[in-house]
Image (cartoon, rainbow, N blue to C red):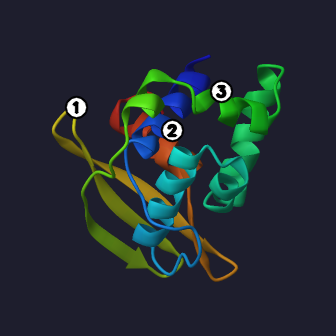
């Protein structure tokens, strides 16, 4: 149950951020913007293209534990109050690329803080690493 809440939390953080057109994810920032755009358009297929393989596997397991498909869980996520409310991309800063790993800070307008999102490069494309983001979030809250 706690993992489901964390997945929802991270998803809401990501929903609260990104715009632009899906296409080239030549940078973590571009991938983040594509993710946000897919969220706004409620486009599950485009959303999946922005996520790492391990993130999709994690989401499949969480959805299965709830008796749902990933597509159904993502579609339900589009209907959350936070997803409905957030229409503008938040500010981003401090994109850092180290080999096939990267981070990007996203402004959290509610808490007035910057949340760090993790990325991995897969098949020459930057993908959001929700699993790594959740892992780091747990570490920082002492729940690892």
Identified at 81% across, 25% down, the residue is 68
- The residue mark sitting in front, 1 or 3, is 3
Q: Quadrant of the N terminus?
A: top right
The residue that disc 1 covers is 110
Residue depicted at 61% across the width and 61% down the height: 50
Q: Residues within 10 Å of mark 1 (few under 14, many from 20)?
A: few
To which residue does mark 3 refer?
Answer: 76
Nearer-the-camera pick, 118 or 47: 47
* Left or right: where 87 falls relative to 92: right
> Which residue, given by chain and number where applicable, does mark 2 sit on?
11
Residue 51 to residue 44: above or below: below
Q: CA distance from mark 3 to mark 2?
A: 12 Å
**Corner quadrant of residue 66:** top right
Q: Indicate the position of residue 117 as horizontal and vertical percent values.
A: 41, 54
Q: Secondary structure at mark 1?
A: loop
N-term-proximal mark, 3 vs 2: 2
Q: CA distance from mark 1 to mark 2?
A: 15 Å
């Amino acid at each position: 149950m706690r993992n489901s809440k964390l997945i929802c939390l991270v998803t809401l953080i990501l929903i609260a951020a990104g715009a632009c057109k899906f296409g080239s994810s030549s940078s973590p920032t571009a991938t983040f913007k594509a993710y946000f755009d897919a969220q706004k358009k409620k486009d599950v297929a485009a959303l999946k293209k922005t996520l790492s393989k391990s993130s999709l596997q994690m989401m499949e397991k969480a959805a299965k534990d709830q008796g749902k498909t990933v597509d159904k869980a993502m579609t339900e996520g589009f209907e959350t109050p936070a997803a409905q409310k957030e229409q503008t991309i938040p500010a981003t800063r401090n994109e850092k690329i180290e080999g096939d790993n990267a981070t990007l800070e996203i402004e959290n307008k509610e808490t007035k803080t910057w949340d760090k999102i993790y990325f991995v490069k897969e098949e020459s494309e930057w993908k959001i690493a929700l699993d790594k983001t959740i892992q780091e979030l747990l570490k920082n809250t002492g729940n690892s």
